[in-house]
Amino acid sequence: MNDVAELATRLDRAQQAGQAIEQLTATTELDVETGYQIQEQVVAQRIRRGERLVGLKMGLTSQAKMAQMGVREVIWGRLTNAMRILDGGTVEVGQYVHPRVEPEVAFLLSGEPGPFGSAVRAVAPALELIDSRYANFRFTLPDVVADNTSAAGFVIGPWCPVPDGLDNLGVLLEVDGRVVETGSTAAILGDPRRAFAQGVHLAARAGVQLEPRWVFLAGAATAAVPLVPGSHVRAVVEGLGAASLKAAP
Ligand code: OOG
Ligand code: MG
C-alpha cells in the first residue's frame, strides 16, 4: 500500500527534476478524492520550500480540452507564486517535462464571498503553461487531480474591469504571430462565470478559502499546443487584450 505522502513525493520530485513518471494508477488504485488529498500534499511540499498559494485554476471546463485529454470531468488545482510568469517573460522549456500552452481567462478575486459581482474585481487575458508529470501526457482522472491538474506556470495580461458579457468573447492562441487555435469564452462551461461558481463550490468543499488578490483561471477555451523552444506565444481575448510568453531557444 502506497500512502498519500509517498505518492505526493513521487509527483513533487518529478516536477522538480522535469522528469516524467508513470501514472500513479499504474500501480495503485486511486479514486478522485484520494487524488485531491495527494494534490494537497504535493502543494504542501512546495509551500514548505517557501512558495505561497496565489490562486486556483479550473481544468477541463471546455469540450476542446475534454476531447484532447480523454477525461470528461471538471477539475481544480492550486497556483503558487513560483508558477507566475511575467507577461512577455521568458521560460526555459528544459525545466519542464513536456510543456504545453493554452489560452485562458483569469479573474482577480476580492476575497469577499458571495456572487460573482462582489467576489471578482477584474478580468484579464491569460496563458496557462501546463505540464503533466506523467509519461506521454496521459492520465486518468485521479492521476491528473493528484498532479495538481498539470499546473506548471501562468501569465496574466492586463487586468480590465469586468465587461457586461463574458460569455461570447473570441479567443485566439498565436505562436510566432500565427493563429494556431481559435475559440470563444462560451466554450468554458457556456460562460467563464459558471467555471468560477463551480470552482468556488469545489474549493469550499475542500475547505479552501479564497483570499483577496488571488487569481482564478477559468480553464482553457481551446486545446493546448506544445511549447517549442525559441517560440513566442500569445493568448488574445476579444475586448480584453493579450498575454504572452517566450520560450528560450
Ligand atoms: C489538465 C489541465 C487542464 C484546462 O484548462 O482545461 C486545464 C491537462 O490538460 O493536462 O488546465
Ligand atoms: Mg488550463
Image (cartoon, rainbow, N blue to C red):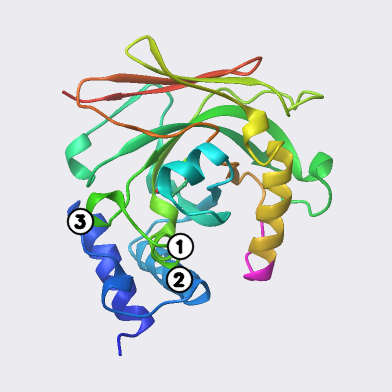
Nearest to the observer: residue 80 or residue 132: 132
Going by the image, does 17 lie left or right of 205?
left
Per the rendering, the mark at residue 35 is 2
Q: Residues within 10 Å of mark 3 (few under 14, many from 20)?
A: many
Q: Residue at x 23, y 27 (%)?
A: 228
Question: Which residue type carries mark 3?
Answer: Ala
Instruction: Measure the C-alpha gap from mark 3 to mark 1.
Output: 17 Å
Q: Residue at x 68, y 69 (%)?
A: 205
- SS type, badge 1: helix
- Compared to residue 179, the image places residue 136 above or below, namely below
Q: Quadrant of the C terminus?
A: top left
- SS type, badge 3: loop
Where in the figure is residue 158, as x and y percent of width and height?
57, 22
Residue 193 in the magenta stretch? The answer is no
- Going from N to C along the chain, the mark reached first, 3 or 2, is 3
Comparing labels 3 and 1, the label whose residue is closer to the camera: 1
Going by the image, does 162 lie left or right of 247?
right
Where in the figure is residue 154, as x and y percent of width and height?
44, 38
Where in the figure is residue 181, as x and y percent of width and height?
45, 22
Per the rendering, the mark at residue 20 is 3
Question: Which residue type carries mark 1?
Answer: Leu
Q: Which residue has dot 1 on it?
A: 141
Q: Residues within 10 Å of mark 1 (few under 14, many from 20)?
A: many
